[in-house]
Image (cartoon, helix red, strand yellow):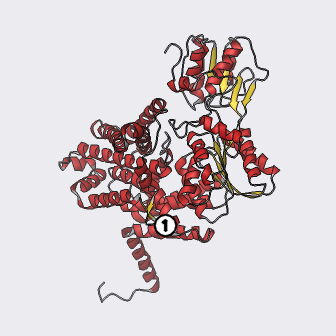
Amino acid sequence: MSATKPAPSPSATMVRCAQDWRRRAREQTIISLLILLVALVALLDVIRPGMVSLNWISSTLLYAAPLGILAAGQTLVMLTGGIDLSVAAVATAAGYVMASQATAQGDARAVFFGLGIAAAVGLVNGIGVGVLRVQPLIMTLGMSLVVAGFLTVYQVLAVASAAAVPGFVTAVGSGTSLGFIPNSLVLWVPIAALVIWGLRRSGYGRLLYAVGDNPTAARLAGVRVWEVLVVDYVLSGLLAGIAGIDLAGLTSTATIDLGNSFLLPSIAAVVIGGTSIFGGRGGYGGSIVGALILTVLVSLLTIIDAPEPFRQVLYGAIILGVAAAYTRVVNE
Amino acid sequence: MKAQARVSGEVSKLVIVNKTEDASQQVADIRNLISAGVNAIVLNPADPNALNGVIKQATDKGIVVVAVDQNVTAPTAYVLSNDQYQYGYLGAKWLFQKLNGTGNVVEMRGAAGAAADTDRHNGFEAALKEFPGIKVVASTFTGWQEATAAQQIQNLLSSGLKIDGVWTSGIDSTVVDAYKTAKKPFVPIVGADNNAFVGDLISLKADGLVGAAVTNPPPVGGAGIALALQILKGQKPADRVIKIQPEVWDNTTADGMAKLQAAYDPKLDPFYGVNFQVPPYTTYTKADLLACKGPGE
């Protein structure tokens, strides 16, 4: 600001403050999301005093982990302007195949099988979207139906296979260390670090933003867009597989609808977290906070004494409200 | 279904059409089956009313129609289903009696809007009226999803609410796991005859787990085949609607324990319903059922 300008009037100061706040909110969107998260936790503790304890935080993180890992894959795909509607089916397949093969094949190979199937479905998605140019929505929706169908057939074959979730998977998915540190953080923290670092610092991360921002420009600049997309969907499939195995560990059972309830939350977490569904903008940090907000929201809705339709409306309204408020802040 | 058709020795051909949860598609399928000249149709209806027209067409041609699992209102069709009202009533009554008529109870329902959930809830409410000392401190919808139920019960356990008993609509072993993880003493739990829960009721009895599995036999399709064959042979049941009564397998009585132990099979899927016979209809063995082979296969 130059010294020759007259002193700003009080109302101008307020306007500038507001603009300043908006600018800061735009830059520090994660901060505003964290404030919302803390507010929700505080509300929970007001409704049921004493509920928020170390134990509660620990188990909330355990429940948020599979959603957070699913949202990692979803973030990577959404950054390119795509969407992966097969994440829930892939997570289910990975968890179920792992559990049903554990007795016959041994624990480690069973986990490997589960992840292999997840990556394979991701590869098919990637080829469909990247090479054959199928709309991501249709491609991944179709694949989720294909996977669910195969799983139903497989269940009939595997029903007498003594399905059991391996002990170490249960320990990772639902155990805690030193009393309160959730074990699934050994999966989630490295994944989060890798995704956040990869998106900010690696060449592949920049390619994802470039493809999402303007695929034609990216192609003209010499980016092999199809390769970027194939790798992207394989990563999303693999992350969904890891989430599914974590989820099987969390519930210590694997059924053929293991991950089904996570599809829409995985998308909501990313959108709340500020990643544009049109691609090119966003990041995984916001999705992590989005996943935590959704998990706390479910706790809140379980605790309040309200009829189910009211809970559903509230859940939807809060997601809508956050997403809308966020989009306004970001676009102004 | 395939197993019962095979062991009956009376079915020459079993046509299986899989179209779930879509009434209009079911109408088209039934039309095709009528044209194919079948003797009997056993179906799991997607809607109680939408199929009435096509069911009438079938029965007009002398085809026996048996709806299993869900109700149809067509007056010429037979209906064979689990009595979900009694599932809710008997399980809740057992729980309230275990609590000597006083205490705080959590009701973990199924999916909001599902007919079976509504019927079970009505049964639960009917039992609740008989025990004025019982208070429902929380009622949740699990959507019959383990992960959802796990988070709900875990939140309720850390909420400081006093919980003396838990009634579930079938996501049962998940609740047992939550108590184990939280290292809280077990309270009486009502669940379904899922393999994992039946196993828990046996193996954790020594650790103080008191509970009951209410049966909800899944292979009603097989029973439907048996009923259709009976009707084709001229043995018509007295009532158009036949409700299979659930049993309560209680791990505190010798009789209940014996039934639980007979049903438990560690080799099966954790959520496989272990009560696989529907007397007096089904005549297959468990091996027949698991082989899943139809006539001629």
Q: Measured along the vertical axis of the image, is residue B255 above or below residue A304?
A: above
Q: Is residue B38 left or right of residue B239?
A: left
Q: Residue at x 69, y 40 (%)?
A: B256
- Residue A112: image quadrant is top left
Quick one: A82 or B81, which is closer to the camera?
B81
Residue A38 placement (x, y as % from top left):
50, 70
Q: Does the rendering let one see residue A73?
A: yes
Q: Measured along the vertical axis of the image, is residue A255 above or below residue B51?
A: below
Q: Quadrant of the C terminus of chain A?
A: bottom left
- Residue A69: image quadrant is bottom left
Q: Is residue A242 left or right of residue B209?
A: left
Quick one: B289 or A317, which is closer to the camera?
B289
Q: Quadrant of the N terminus of chain A?
A: bottom left
Residue B286 placement (x, y as % from top left):
56, 26
Quick one: B49 or B65, which is closer to the camera?
B65
Q: Residue at x 38, y 70 (%)?
A: A28
Q: Residue at x 34, y 41 (%)?
A: A109
The kind of residue tagged 1 is: Leu
Quick one: B192 or A80, which is closer to the camera?
B192
Q: Which residue matches tag 1? A: A37
Q: Measured along the vertical axis of the image, is residue A146 above or below residue A222?
A: above
Kind of element beneath mark 1: helix
Q: Is residue A204 left or right of residue B28?
A: left
Q: Is residue B220 left or right of residue B177?
A: right
